[in-house]
Amino acid sequence: MPERTDLYHRQRRIPGWRQARLAGARVLVAGAGATGNEVLRLLARSGVGHIAVVDFDQVERSNLSRTSLFDECDVGANKAKAAVAALLKIHPELLATAFAGRLQTSVGAGTLRAMDIAVGCLDSVEARLALNRMCRAAGTPWVDVGIEADAAAVTLFGGRSGACYECEMTEEMWQARSRRHSCTGAPVRAADAPAGVSITMAALAGAIAAHEVLWMLMTPRAKQAARCGRRIMVSANGWHMDTTKPAQNPQCNAHELAAPIAATPPGAQEWTTAELLTFFGCPDGSVELPHDALMGWRCTECGYLRTEIGALEAIRPSRLKCRCGSRQLQLDVSSTIESGEPEADIALHRLGVPEGGLLRLRCGRRRFYAELGGPFQFGTEG
C-alpha cells in the first residue's frame, strides 16, 4: 500500500510492530469515563479491530472537560453507547459492542474468555474486584488504571499467574467496600464527593495503559509473563516514575481456577436453575451464582414481606424502602441455588446472570462450570 494512503504506515515502521495482529485483537474496556475515553481513543487510532465497552452511567455536562470522545450532543446518553459511536467515527471498520449496564450484571466471565485482554478504568473497589475475579476465572490478562489529581498508577495483571488485584486488598480497602452496603447487605450510595480529576492526568494514565495493551497484543504469549505483575506509578508532583511488582497472596480466594467449563446453547440465561441442572443431567444439584442475588425482604418495623428479585449490586437503594416508610429491612440474599428450592424456578437472567455468565455447578461429587449462551459476537448490542 502506498505510504500516503496507508493509515498505519508510520506504525508499521516500528520494529516488531504487528498491525495485522491488532486488527484481529479483542479488547474489553470497563469504564468509559476520563481514563476510559483515552484508552478507547488510542486503541481505536492504533487499529485494534474489536472493542467492547462497559458502563452503566450517563454522560453529564461536567464530564466534557475531561473526556475526549464526548461532546454536548452526548449529554444524557449512556457512556458506553456514546463511546462506541465516537469510536466508529475514528475507525469505521471497527467491530464494537456497548454494554450499557453494570459490569457485574452485564458481562460474564465467559465474555471475558473471548477477549485477548481487558482494561479496568473503574472508580470503585467493588467493580475492580468483580473484573479481577472474572478475568482470573477466564484466564484473561487485564490492566488496572487509577488516577488522582497529580498521580497515576497502571498495573498489568496476568490471567492465571502471579499476583492479582485481590492479593493486595488491605483491611482498609475491605472496609471501604463494606461501607457501600448497609448492615443488612443493601447497597448504599457513597457519601464522599468524587475526587478531583484533570484531563491531563487521565490522558497520561490512559496512554500508559493503552501502550501496555498494545505491547501485550503484539508480544508472543511466552514472553508476556515477564511483564505481567508490573505496576507503573507516575507522579506529576516533581515528575518521577517508579515501577513495582505486587506480591502474590497464596491464600487469595480469587485464584481458584474455573475448570472444567461446559458450554450451553444460546439463550441459556433465560433458563431457570432447575432447567440448567436438568440439561447437565444433575436435577438434584446446585448452582453457585457469580454474585449475591436478592430474593426479597421483610420490614423489621411492620413485618411486611416483599419479593424483590435481582442482583443485589444492581438494586437501586431507593427501591429498598417499605410502604410504611421504613428502611429497616431484613434482606433475603443468596448466592447458591439448590434444586427443589422455590428460587430454582426463577430465570437466571432475573437473578442478574448475563449471557456469558460463568456458573459453578455441583452434582454429587462433580464440580464444574457452565458458560451461559453461545460464543460472544462483536458488533451486537450488549
Image (cartoon, helix red, strand yellow):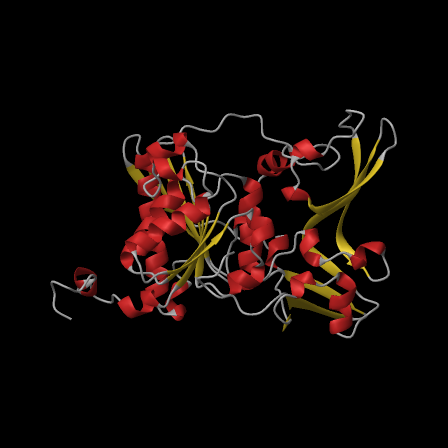
How many numbered marks have been drawn onto this rendered protein structure? 0
Residue 261 image point, x, y percent = 63, 70
Residue 53 image point, x, y percent = 45, 52
318 versus 21 height, above or below: above
Residue 332 visible from this viewpoint: no
Q: Quadrant of residue 138?
A: bottom right
Name the foreground residue: 130 vs 162.
130
Image check: 254 left or right of 10? Answer: right
267 versus 119 height, above or below: below
Name the foreground residue: 137 vs 269.
269
Image check: 209 left or right of 125? Answer: left
319 versus 54 height, above or below: above
Tell which residue pokes out farthest to the front in this image.
73
Residue 338 image point, x, y percent = 81, 59
Image check: 91 left or right of 347? Answer: left
Residue 183 image point, x, y percent = 73, 32
Residue under the point 35% across and 40% down = 70
Q: Quadrant of residue 1?
A: bottom left
Residue under the point 64% across and 43% down = 313
